[in-house]
Amino acid sequence: MENQTSASEFIFLGLSKDPQLQIFFFLVFSTIYLLTLSGNLTIILVIRMDPSLYTPMYFFLSHLSFVDICYSTDIVPKMLVDLMTKRKTISFVGCLTQMFFSLLLSVTEVFILSAMAYDRYTAVCHPLHYVAIMNKTICTYLVMGAWIMGFLFAIINTVPTLNVHFCGFHEISHFSCELPPLLKSSCSDIFMNNVILFSSVAMFGLGSFLPTLVSYIHIISTILKIRSAKGRSKAFSTCSSHLIVVGLLYMTGMSQYMKPSKVSSMILDEIFSIQYSIVTPMLNPIIYSLKNKEVKRALGKIFGHK
């Protein structure tokens, strides 16, 4: 029988063992990471440099970009190093650290998106009271609340993992230390860990999704009451970018953490993880800059174009 031990080191099994594929993945993900950093940093700098963007919507957007930079940095650099090395290992402390920040940043992001949905609801449904409702203090509290929710979620799921034991070669069927693949590699009873994970995902997920859903029900209802097609188009354009980002994140993130373990597969898990932890942080600044006239105008002003 294999000895039951506390792991001191883990070995990643994904993405591929083919040297040529590893080089291809390295080029692809290094490009994505550079685009993520440059795109989100540009969004942050543009918002800081243009006084016309000192509004709640762009306040939340700058924090979303900061979270995306941190989230991508937590995952991609280590993955790029592993793609160029034969032995893809990470220490137990390093694995828990990566997992903690992954949980923290993912939940912080969904609550910031929830705050952005409330901001759009106020702008569309209560435009006359928008300035009074979405004041600087409320915006700061909403962002602080998002970080607190992310921290609580990470603590709730990281602390029980300290009691999990691992056997054999401590292999993780993934390219990073995400909690579901990490738990699958253990040889101890993880029933309570799964209960805590599923319960916390349901609670925090619904806690951020329901306000977003309710906000958009009111937004759509208000937009449909607008008589002119131009007015409806203008009102919807202020929400379309946010709606795309929310859809991308919730469809993949919730699918990864809420799906039954019986329907899980290594390839499916990796595709979901790549989408919400690597691709989505790259797409966010692109979606917001391409769909937002004010951001494009500010970019043109800074770079000297009409």
Image (cartoon, helix red, strand yellow):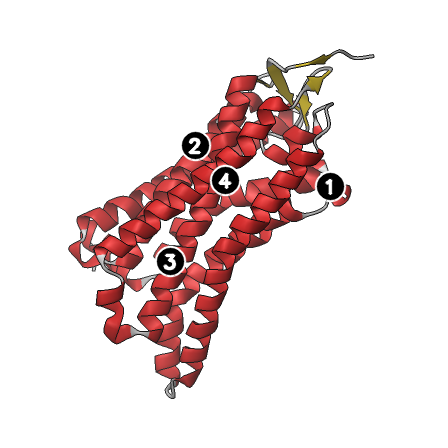
Say which label, 1 or 2, has the lower sequence index: 2
Say which label, 2 or 3, has the lower sequence index: 2
Which residue is under mark 2? 73
Which residue is under mark 3? 116
Say which label, 1 or 3, has the lower sequence index: 3
At 77% across and 42% down in the image, what residue appears?
262
Say which label, 4 or 2, has the lower sequence index: 2
Which quadrant of the rendered structure holds the C terminus?
A: bottom left
In three-dimensional space, the C-alpha distance between marks 2 and 3, rounded to whole angstroms, equals 23 Å
Q: Give coordinates of residue 174: x percent, y percent.
A: 64, 30
Instruction: Classify mark 1: helix, strand or loop.
Output: helix
Say which label, 1 or 4, has the lower sequence index: 4
At 63% across and 44% down in the image, what residue appears?
198
Q: Is residue 237 left or right of residue 257?
A: left
At 54% across and 28% down in the image, what residue appears?
159
Indicate the quadrant where residue 134 lies. bottom left
